[in-house]
Image (spheres, rainbow, N blue to C red):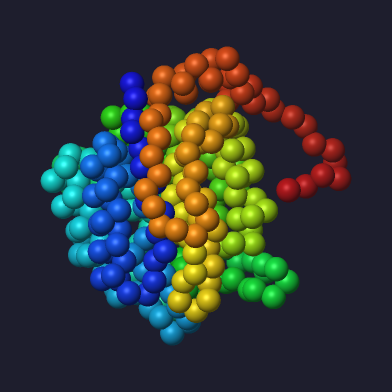
Amino acid sequence: MTLRAACIQLTATNDLTANCAHAEALMRKAIAQGARFLALPENAFFMRGSDKDAPAPYTVETHPGVRLCQGLAREHGVWILIGSIFVPAPPRTPESPAKWFNRTVVINDQGELVMQYDKIHLFDAMIGGDQMYRESDRIQYGEHLALATTPWGRMGLTICYDMRFPHLYRDLAKAGATLFAAPAAFTYVTGVAHWHVLLRARAIETGSFILAPGQCGYHPGGRRTYGHSLIVDPWGNILAEASEDHPQVLLADLDITQVAQVRRDLPCLQHDRAYRTTDDFSI
């Protein structure tokens, strides 16, 4: 079985209408080239320019980007993964500040919403010695793993910073994932250092295909993302790679049978062993 998959690389802004139009043009281009599964990046339809920017409080069902993708899916019989949208999160306590979920949405070829995933690991980090990111100030972390059942196998859902947590990928693989989505808006500095290494490692460790559509170029407020959207096979080979700074369609044909072959030849998912710790060792 072969899947022609597309990663849609974008340079999103804080203009939702313009982002939807740009994403639609690239998705239609991918469909015209035979793609059956389309993956959009994190923050697909809205990228903050400053702390004053806030997405409109759409639900998943009313979001214009989701409705756009549902229409395209129905029209052309394709599956679409929206890397993430912002959805208002209910407060955990009455005193909690208003926050958003950073949510992946999967749409099947009938235009139906079949799976959602809220980003678990939030990017709170100092980059380059002077750029402080505090995603947790405005995003509420998710608490649940998510797998989408597709005609090509089960897909483990992750978002960006999640890729630095290999146990998440291993747990998803053991739960049946043979494909992974890793949509991202990776910073340029961390992208140069870690993007390729992390994604190839996650593919190798789990014997799975990785679809990693990314944001690229410069965004409002001066933020720069890394681009280099990737499609990686279960052996860690890069099947396709996008440019650094330009929105584009990235295509690859995935031989789905390769997953079973790699996992048979190198069955590391079956080789976990319990081990003891010393008295002075704690986690």
Q: Quadrant of residue 247?
A: bottom left
Q: Residue at x 52, y 56 (%)?
A: 244
Compared to 41, does 211 lie above or below?
A: above
Query: Residue 32: percent from the left, percent from the top?
Result: 23, 42
Q: Is residue 173 visible?
A: no
Q: Residue at x 58, y 19 (%)?
A: 267
Compared to 1, does 246 lie above or below?
A: below
Q: Residue at x 57, y 71 (%)?
A: 134
Of 89 and 157, nearer the camera is 157
Query: Residue 174: percent from the left, percent from the top?
Result: 50, 30
Query: Residue 196: percent from the left, percent from the top?
Result: 60, 45
Of 51 and 120, nearer the camera is 51
Query: Going by the image, does 236 lie left or right of 98?
Result: right
Of 106 and 185, nearer the camera is 185
Q: Quadrant of the N terminus?
A: top left
Query: Residue 248: percent from the left, percent from the top?
Result: 39, 52
Q: Residue at x 60, y 66 (%)?
A: 124
Query: Going by the image, does 124 lie left or right of 156?
Result: right
Of 269 and 13, nearer the camera is 13
